Image (tube, rainbow, N blue to C red):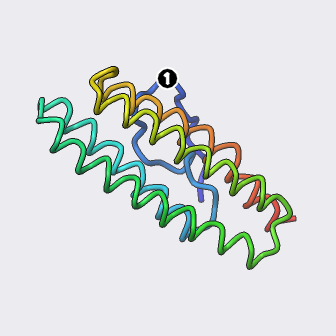
Amino acid sequence: MGQKTIYDYNQKIPEWNESLEIGLDSIDREHRFFLDLIREIEVEALRDRESEFIQLHIDELILYARFHFFSEEIYMKKIKYPDLDKHRELHLQLIGKLSDQVTRFQMKEIHIESIVEFLVNWFKYHTLVEDVKIARFISS
């Protein structure tokens, strides 16, 4: 890989680029798809779709998140990653917080933009801080 692009934390939903890669191909592919799912939710919201239609995209994202977390945790177990339990807890926390956000959206307490913002902020932090630790562990 060449020189990495500096990541723009102010960008709402980032375009995929090398700065978002952690260096593990399978996980990077899953992260890219996860980001695409977030983008789809935002696109549907901008099209002013019915909340039921947006809910289908949210459900897809939650299912994919569960798959990705399971996949990532199996990988961490395989490489004997020492912080697996802590990392698993972070995954559980996301599902819990996201479920709370979705309930609030369904009750019309928040707009879909709040969920998108929550997901983007979580993705940026989790990928660029927590998941990078996995890559560092492998390379050490």
Query: Percent from the top left, x then y, of residue 14?
Result: 43, 37
The residue pinned by badge 1 equals 10
> Which of the two residues, 70 or 124, is positioned nearer the viewer here?
70
Instruction: State the image quarter where residue 70 is shown.
Output: bottom right
**Residue at the spot 61% in from the left edge and 52% down from the top edge:** 91
Position of 20 relative to 43 (above/below): below
Query: Percent from the top left, x then y, of residue 86?
Result: 77, 53
Q: Is residue 111 left or right of residue 9?
A: left
> Which of the two residues, 86 or 35, is positioned nearer the viewer here?
86
Query: Percent from the top left, x then y, of residue 79?
Result: 78, 75
Label 1: state its secondary structure: loop
Q: How many marks?
A: 1
> Which of the two residues, 109 or 24, is positioned nearer the viewer here?
109
Q: Is residue 86 left or right of residue 14?
A: right
> Which of the two residues, 35 or 18, is positioned nearer the viewer here?
35
**Residue at the spot 70% in from the left edge and 43% down from the top edge:** 129
Query: Percent from the top left, x then y, of residue 104?
Result: 37, 28
Judged from this view, the residue extending furthest toward the bottom is 78
Q: Amino acid at mark 1?
A: Asn
**Residue at the spot 24% in from the left edge and 44% down from the top edge:** 55
**From the image, which quarter does the C terminus lie in?**
bottom right
**From the image, which quarter does the N terminus lie in?**
bottom right
Instruction: State the image quarter where residue 41 is shown.
Output: top left
Binning the other alpha carbons within 10 Å of mark 1 as few (below 14), some (14 to 19) or many (20 upward) gives few
**Residue at the spot 41% in from the left edge and 28% down from the top edge:** 12
Instruction: State the image quarter where residue 124 is shown.
Output: top right
